[in-house]
Amino acid sequence: MMETPQINRMLKPDRGVGIVGYGAYIPRFRLPASEVSRVWRGGSGGVPIEEKAVAGLDEDVITMSVEAARNALARSGIHPGHIRAVWIGSESHPYSVKPSSTIVAEAIGATPHTLAADWEFACKAGTEAFQAAVGFVGSRMADYALAIGMDTAQGRPGDALEYTAGAGGAAFILGPEKQSLVAVEGSYSFATDTPDFWRRADEKYPEHGERFTGEPAYFRHITSAAQTLMESLDAKPSDYQFAVFHQPNTKFPQRVARDLGFSGEQIQAGLLVPRIGNVYAGSALVGLTAILDIANPGDRILLVSYGSGAGSDAMSLRVTEHLTSRREAAPSTESYIARRTEIDYATYARYRGKLTLQ
Amino acid sequence: MEVSSHWRVRQQRYALVGEVCPSCEVKIFPPRDVCPECGDEAKTHFQFSGRGEVYSYTTLFDAPQGHEAQLPYTLALVKLEEGPLVTAQLTDVNGTKLEVGMPVEMVTRKLRSDGDRGMLVYGYKFRPRLQAA
Ligand SMILES: [Zn+2]
């Protein structure tokens, strides 16, 4: 095989692009990890998080995306008719065939002059849509594009994933940098064929490669993506006020941050997994919304997602002077987390369709 | 309900899009193309704010066929800020003390599914108002 040619690896469009509006959504139900442990392990052993967010009976990726998108629109101040792409990354689209994105586009008033599609790449489907939206706006094909990462994650009853597989996500409207709340300084994507986690068509629950999910998968991809992007920008961890990584549990993002040279303080604001669980395609993105709720103009943010199968998208962001006045236009991510109703395992089983009635 | 009848009402049902009377400016929901006040033709679309308050409510423990999956649920008459009264489900209210006059806001939620193989039906419900940041 030939050597990979030396190329400029950073992705950056000719036209400057930024986030002109952002919005989070987290459903209000919480299942404590101790409940999963009580039912499946007699309450013994440690748990990977405190609790996870669970969608209600009338919620799914479509309804959750609609609310996050409305929050993003409120902060952007743009008319929904100006959105020229509605792209939703998720691994829990309610239909196998029929896009979630057309329903969301219709509900927010973005139809009919728009692209619409659902994206699939495990937990990085949302940042993949984000990257594409940066390119779409950066090429001047359109002024505004909406990228969403949202999930109501599946975990087989009793499986290790059941402790963490949560629900939530975030929506971002990408637009010209001049109007943006957050400028995209540059990005980079890293992907290889790594079979750490998958779900076959028509299967309800995913399979995972146990310990294989760590070193060659999560850590290698995130570290490579982050380091390549920082090298391209001539940036170092101390240049960033905040960093946010994909959060399958509490330990992985803490360790990858440490490996890369980030402090616990830098990742604190975006580390939501202990309180809402792993929200898959929404994980790093909803963490970013929590950071944007408190960041100051000039602050730099490094975001790195991870999707099994496997790949990472890294983005370097810089907060503009417009953020502070616009973020009040929609509920904060913290207010969604605070809106908390605890449920027991039986209620959870009903809400998640784990009870068969016939 | 036929697929075509769901399709025709999707904007009013997903987003509370009604009408405004060009003559007397009365806001109309659900849309009926004729002003209930002055009788003039009223076909101009109007996007309701989604804010309103509970006018009356009742909790159902039995439901018509096709609506059993979300039982028990609360049905309410909601008085919209712009005037009209709308019948809709309240959501996110289990454990909440309900009262007449409670401020609510529109959210788009799953109303029901036509069995395991049919289409999913989405539409407006109302929940206790969430504050902006
Ligand atoms: Zn009239």
Image (cartoon, rainbow, N blue to C red):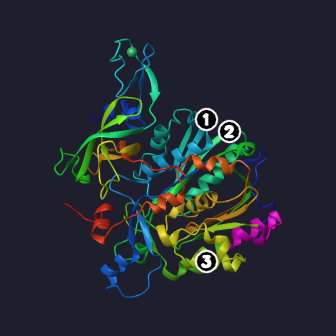
Q: Are marks 1 and 3 in contact (CB under 8 Å)?
A: no
Q: Is A189 situated left or right of B88 in this image?
A: right
Write down the residue under mark 1.
A82
Judged by its main secondary structure, the magenta piece is helix
Q: Are marks 1 and 2 in contact (CB under 8 Å)?
A: yes
Q: Which mark is residue A254?
A: 3
Pointer 3 chain: A
Q: Is residue B94 magenta?
A: no
In the rendered structure, which disc, 1 or 3, sits on the residue that comes first in sequence? 1
Q: Residue at x 38, y 79 (%)?
A: A34
Q: Are marks 2 and 3 on the same chain?
A: yes
- Given the current orientation, which residue lies at the most extreme bottom position? A44
- Identify the secondary structure beneath mark 2: loop
Quadrant of the snapshot with the N terminus of chain A? bottom right
Magenta stretch bounds:
A223-239
A356 above or below B86?
below
How many other residues sit within 10 Å of disc 2, few (<14), some (14-19) or many (≥20)?
some
Looking at the picture, tell me which residue is in the foreground, B8 or A189.
B8
Q: Is A48 situated left or right of A202 in this image?
A: right
Residue A357: image x %, image y %?
20, 61
The span from disc 1 to disc 3 (Cα, nearest Å) is 39 Å
Q: Residue at x 59, y 38 (%)?
A: A83
How many other residues sit within 10 Å of disc 1, few (<14), some (14-19) or many (≥20)?
some
- The amino acid type of the residue labelled 2 equals Asp
Write down the residue under mark 2.
A143
- Identify the secondary structure beneath mark 1: helix
* Corner quadrant of residue A267: bottom right
Looking at the picture, tell me which residue is in the foreground, A119 or A74.
A74
